[in-house]
Image: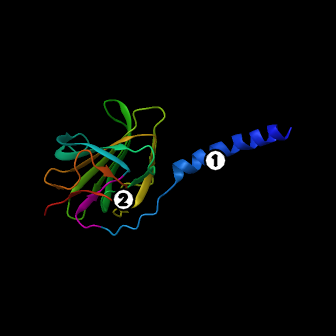
Amino acid sequence: MQFIFASFAVLLWIPWFVFCFFIRDFHRDIPPIPLASISPIDGVVTDITQVQNPFIDQISCCYTIQQSSWGEFNLHSPIEGKVEQLWVTKPLNNKKGLVYWVRTDEQDDVVVHVALNSAFQHGNTTLHPGERVGQVRRCGFVALGCRVNIYLPKNVQHVAEAGDKVAAGKNMLAKFIH
């Protein structure tokens, strides 16, 4: 009889540990880096290309980051600025996504697109159009191996390269040139 109660107790604790795994937030003391774009998630830079930004119709440098399965699942703001627009729709190739556009005080546009291609992937944000967001501020949650595209101005100085591991709110992707 005690074995049954012990087994039941273990089964109740498993969901609690899974929940705690997903909501963990690593402590990272990172000073703001002016005129830089910081990684919004933990992961690996898989691609850096010049593309037509599908959200604000301009040529951009696109960093693609594949989210780590073992890092934190928080979404951070890569720059400081004003949130211009937020899309929580099917904006690209009829696939679900979370997209937000931030404009810096220097008028640089940065768009973060979280691709949610699986039914098991989830994303949300606490951002609202018109509000200011600080660099590396936690501003949302993405889970289960999402891919994130960060569209930066085309004339940025590259810091991270394809294949580099990056940590959310810690590693620099690029510097803005003014």
Dot 1, how many residues are within 10 Å of its Cα: few (below 14), some (14-19), or many (20+)?
few
Dominant SS type (magenta): loop
Q: Is residue 124 left or right of residue 102?
A: right
In three-dimensional space, the C-alpha distance between marks 2 and 1, rounded to whole angstroms, equals 27 Å
- The residue lying toward the viewer, choosing from 35 and 166, is 166
The residue that mark 1 highlights is 16
The image quadrant of residue 108 is: bottom left
- The residue lying toward the viewer, choosing from 1 and 95, is 1
- Please provide percent x and percent y for residue 33: 27, 67
Instruction: Give the structural element (helix, strand or loop) at label 2.
Output: loop
Residue furthest to the front: 3
Q: Is residue 154 left or right of residue 16?
A: left
User: What is the quadrant of the N terminus in the image?
Assistant: top right
Magenta part of the chain: 33-40
Rendered residue at 45%/49% (across/down) = 73
- Please provide percent x and percent y for residue 103: 26, 57
- Number of numbered discs visible in the structure rendering: 2
Rendered residue at 26%/53% (across/down) = 110
Residue furthest to the right: 1
Mark 1: which amino acid?
Trp
- Please provide percent x and percent y for residue 21: 54, 49
Residue 140 colored magenta?
Answer: no
Q: Is residue 169 above or below residue 18?
A: below
Instruction: Give the structural element (helix, strand or loop) at label 1.
Output: helix
Residue 34 colored magenta?
Answer: yes
**Residue 169: mark:** 2
- The residue lying toward the viewer, choosing from 56 and 24, is 24
Dot 2, how many residues are within 10 Å of its Cα: few (below 14), some (14-19), or many (20+)?
many
Badges 2 and 1: C-beta atoms under 8 Å apart?
Answer: no
Mark 2: which amino acid?
Gly
Rendered residue at 42%/40% (across/down) = 145
